[in-house]
């Protein structure tokens, strides 16, 4: 009887440790579940904090995955067509470094960013450790793109690390209804 109690305690301890230290999970779930509701609304699912390289804490944010570009469009503060013309600095968000780009705005599809050229930072992958862009900076391209952005403080950021930028070649049709 005593061994069963210790075994349960060990299993619960391991599960609790896994829950408190995991991040970067993909949102899944069927209709009507909390996971599918979060997926549909485009909210950030949660975050954990861990020690950063400078001794401070770093947020590890679990990002929502949008099922369609329409979901991205619906939740973005600003949606625009444009292209990055240069990198103009770095900023920090959730304890991770983010590269800021000067974007030449061709057309604003949603929102009012207020300028012809706009400074937008690529949202970093906050759970990746020292490398903010494991798959490369999505705005580090001279190609024409659709950018889904939100404002954090006084700065514009792509909505998520993986789904804030879509390629949009000349002559392509919009993948959503505005």
Image (cartoon, rainbow, N blue to C red):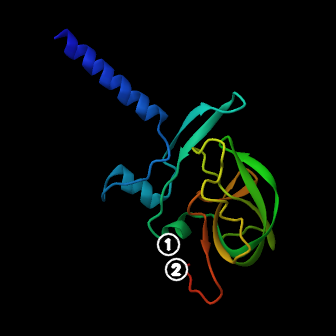
Looking at the picture, how far across and down is residue 65, in whole percent? 48, 59
In the figure, 146 relative to 31: above or below? below
Looking at the picture, how far across and down is residue 161, in whole percent? 60, 57
Q: Label 1: which residue?
A: 70
In the figure, 144 relative to 96: above or below? below
Is residue 15 visible to the viewer in this orientation of the structure? yes
Q: Residue at x 67, y 40 (%)?
A: 95
Q: Which residue is drawn at 62% across and 90% down?
A: 171
Depth order, front residue of 55/74:
55
Looking at the picture, how far across and down is residue 127, in whole percent? 57, 44
In the figure, 46 relative to 175: above or below? above
Depth order, front residue of 136/174:
136
| Residue 39 shown left or right of residue 31 in the figure | right
Q: In which quarter of the image is residue 86?
A: bottom right
Q: Is mark 2 on a helix, strand or loop?
A: loop
Evaluate if marks 2 and 1 touch, with contact meaning CB atoms under 8 Å apart. yes
| Residue 80 shown left or right of residue 119 in the figure | left
Looking at the picture, how far across and down is residue 105, in whole percent? 75, 75
Q: Label 2: which residue?
A: 177
Q: Which residue is drawn at 77% across and 58% down?
A: 100
Q: Quadrant of residue 109?
A: bottom right
Mark 2 or 1, nearer chain start: 1
Q: Which residue lies furthest to the bottom in this view?
A: 171
């Amino acid at each position: 009887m005593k061994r069963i109690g210790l075994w349960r305690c060990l299993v619960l301890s391991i599960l609790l440790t896994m829950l408190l230290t995991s991040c970067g999970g993909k949102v899944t779930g069927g209709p009507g579940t909390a996971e599918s509701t979060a997926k549909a609304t485009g909210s950030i699912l949660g975050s954990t904090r861990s020690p950063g390289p400078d001794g401070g804490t770093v947020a590890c944010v679990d990002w929502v995955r949008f099922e369609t570009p329409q979901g991205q469009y619906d939740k973005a503060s600003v949606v625009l067509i444009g292209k990055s013309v240069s990198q103009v600095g770095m900023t920090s968000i959730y304890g991770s470094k983010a590269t800021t780009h000067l974007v030449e705005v061709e057309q604003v599809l949603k929102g009012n960013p207020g300028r012809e050229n706009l400074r937008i930072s690529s949202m970093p992958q906050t759970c990746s450790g020292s490398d903010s862009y494991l798959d490369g900076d999505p705005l580090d391209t001279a190609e024409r793109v659709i950018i889904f952005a939100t404002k954090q403080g006084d700065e514009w950021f792509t909505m998520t690390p993986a789904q804030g930028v879509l390629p949009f070649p000349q002559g392509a049709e919009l993948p959503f209804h505005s």
